[in-house]
Amino acid sequence: MNTPTPMVLVVEDDEPLRTALLRLLEVAGYDVRGYASTGDFLLERPDDRHGCVLIDVQLPGPSGLDLQAALQRLAIDLPVIVMTGRPDVASSVRALKAGAVDFLTKPIEREQLLAAVRSALDRDAARRLAAEEARTLLARFGLLSDVERRVFDGIVAGRLNKQIADDLSIAERTVKLHRSRLMVKLEVESAAELGRLAERLQRVHAT
Amino acid sequence: MRRPTVLACAFVLVGALALTPAAWPEPAANKRVLVVYATGRLLPAIVAFDKGFRGLLGERPNGDVEIYDEFLDAARFSGPEYDRAVADHLRQKYSSLPPDVVVVVAREALRFAVRQQHLLPAGTPVVHAVVGTDDLAELGPMPPGFVGVPTVDEFKRTIEQALRWHPQARRLVVVLGVGTGRDRAWRAKVMAEKVAFEPRLTVDVLEGLTTEEATARLAVLGPDTIVFSPGYELDTVGHFDAPFARIRTMASRTQVPFYVPLTTPLGTGVVGGYAADFEVQGHEAARVVTQLLDGVAPPALEMPALVPAPMHVDWRQLRRFRIDERSLPPGAVVHFREPSIWEDHRNAIISAVTLVLLQAGLIAGLLVERRRRHEAETAAAHSRAELAHASRLAVAGELAAALAHEINQPLGAILSNADTAEMILDSDVDRRDLLRTIVADIRRDDVRASEVIRRLRTLLQKHDVERAPFSLDEAAIDVELVLRPEARRRGVSLTVQPSGTQAMLLGDRIQVQQVLINLVLNAMDAVADVPEPRRVVSVAVHQTPDQCTVRVIDRGHGIAPEDRSKVFESFFTTKRSGMGLGLSIARTIVDAHGGSIHAEAGAVHGSEFIVTLPTRASDAPRMAVPA
């Protein structure tokens, strides 16, 4: 992904520490933005851009974990790295269960921080790629007519052309015609490829 | 003699009342005693004798003795004609009141009585007194009916005692007279006895001089001389006087020890001598007279052989000539002893000493008590300080998480800034401005971290209790700084409202801060479970001229009314964790500062803890000097 510079968002109430972290990340080559509280972050609601969020657990008002939950609820899919000054098992488990990429203990070493950010960005990139693919897939699937979809379902269910023709009360030859058309529309060349695509579609639908 | 008359009246009265007039005996007739003195009257010797004589006779029951006194004045008047005339006069005078006993006092009176005894009613006993054994020897055997206790003129013993006291004496001056019979008798005795002393020292006899001349001679006597004189009655120019008066004149100017065989000159400047006291002689005579009046026959009388003649001394003269009182012969009579303060005021001294001792005991007791109390107070203050410190350690433990966070933040910032700087330096890009900012931030964060450590140290520090002036406002602001991270950690809003005045408190700032910390932590505990908007703790300082008040207010659950008085007791707690010592220590500290602490229900929710401490504005400058 050579598109725009990744953005790292930092939610940390302690101004000097926030400044230091932002400065480090900026020098490391990222676009940065800082917030003092959960409320500040949610009010601004950053645009959907490649990046990740660094959240301090101990925040005045709603905590970092609350923010993490809010992001999920609002379907903001930015990968989250949680920071804490006081690691305790309960909050780290909670953070990781809620999908935190990493759990960092302050003071944070540069390599640790940058590695966590990198891995979060990788995950974001992967997620974005998968989402892009799913979007393409769904777009192609959307091109299918009703009959073609039913034929597709029959193929994916492993039924023979003859059986599908019986199910749909159409001629076996018509089934073959629909089959070749939908393969063109879905840009697949073999039945095996079609099977994989069906699996991926199922996954996309599931999420 | 009024008493018989009174008695008679009483008898008549009683008899009349009882209607038994014949039952009462006739009152007995009074006894008469005639005392004939050889001298004139009112001489000290006579007065003393009379005192002893009448003293004893006056003690007789019924007071049945009448005493008649006659004075021969034999020194001036003498001779057979005079004797006879006086005797006739007395016989006639007492013919209607014949004496039952006649007492003759001194040598010339006895001589008179012996010669004129035929004029006395037959069988009248004669008691002689103040008569020396030498006189008796000279007068020959006494006629029947003549009795008495003689004296001894102790000239020799007196001089011997004088020489014992003045062993360095080289000269003895004796003053004598030759005028009257008595003078001559004494002279003869002295002249006979002085011989015994002549081997030891020179004996000079002064006689044939006027008293003035003798006095002048005595006045110039050198040291190592002593004077002895029995006195005399008639001097060379024909002047009569009593011996004691002569001695008084001479002794008044004599600078050397002056000894006399008489008691009457004592007090005139003489040391003293062996002599029979005249009062004792009167007493002895009265004892004989009493027996005679009671019907004892003269031969059957109980009498001592001699009137005792002990050593008589003037205490002031003993001091004057440095004679040790312990060297006095046994039985010596000391006159004019100035009672020591002890003798004079024995009871007062005992009372005073007792009082002083009691007082001293009381004072000592109070001092001991004060010391003990001081020690106890010191021990109490010490243990209070220990307890307070232990409690601060506990509080520090409670705050450790928050304080660690507080230190961690700047450390994190410092680390990130340092990392950034390193990255900039590695990248060959010239970003000096940013580096400068980074270094400044590192410095600032370092200061911030060390400030947290300083505040923590205040809590952990073990210190002796201080009494120094401090500002309650500053103390409260410090408390806020210590507790703010903890408040943040707990999601509690903590506000501190200083009074904004300059008033100072006198006491231990750390302990007072500890009180506030305990109260604020309690308040934060109280709001732990309430909805967030109510998680508010505020501290407000108010100051008036003489006291200041800190109110710690929370909006929590409040204290049950029945617990409000118990919260300050040790080990009382409503919390799941906690020893229940925080408020008890707070109260101990506030008490030690002369203040008070109490709890009230809050205006709407929660509770209010109010600490009142006296301001010591007037003391502040004084305390400020040693501080």
Image (cartoon, helix red, strand yellow):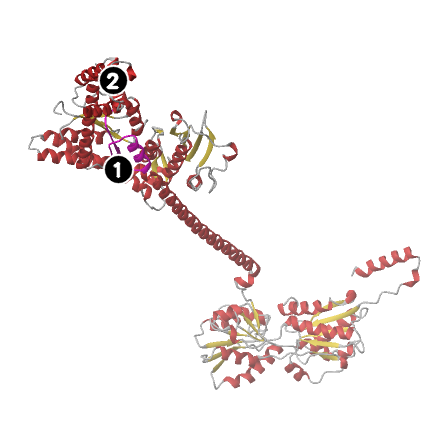
Picture coordinates of residue B439 (x, y %)? 15, 34
Residue positioned 23% across, 13% down in the render: A145
Region in magenta? A76-102
Tell whether B624 sits left or right of B334.
left
**Which is more toward the observer, B161 or B37?**
B161
Label 2 resides on the chain identified as: A
Picture coordinates of residue B520 (x, y %)? 38, 34
Residue positioned 53% across, 79% down in the render: B161
Mark 2 residue element: helix
Cα gap from disc 2 to disc 1, whole angstroms:
67 Å
**Which is more toward the observer, B150 or A72?**
A72
Mark 1 residue element: helix
Q: In which quarter of the image is residue A201?
A: top left
Q: In which quarter of the image is residue B42?
A: bottom right
For residue A151, the mark is 2
Q: In which quarter of the image is residue B240?
A: bottom right
Name the quarter where the C terminus of chain B is drawn.
Answer: top left
- Which residue in the protein does label 1 denote? B407
Amino acid of disc 2: Val
Q: Do the residues labelled 2 and 1 touch (CB within 8 Å)?
A: no
**Which is more toward the observer, B97 or B514?**
B514
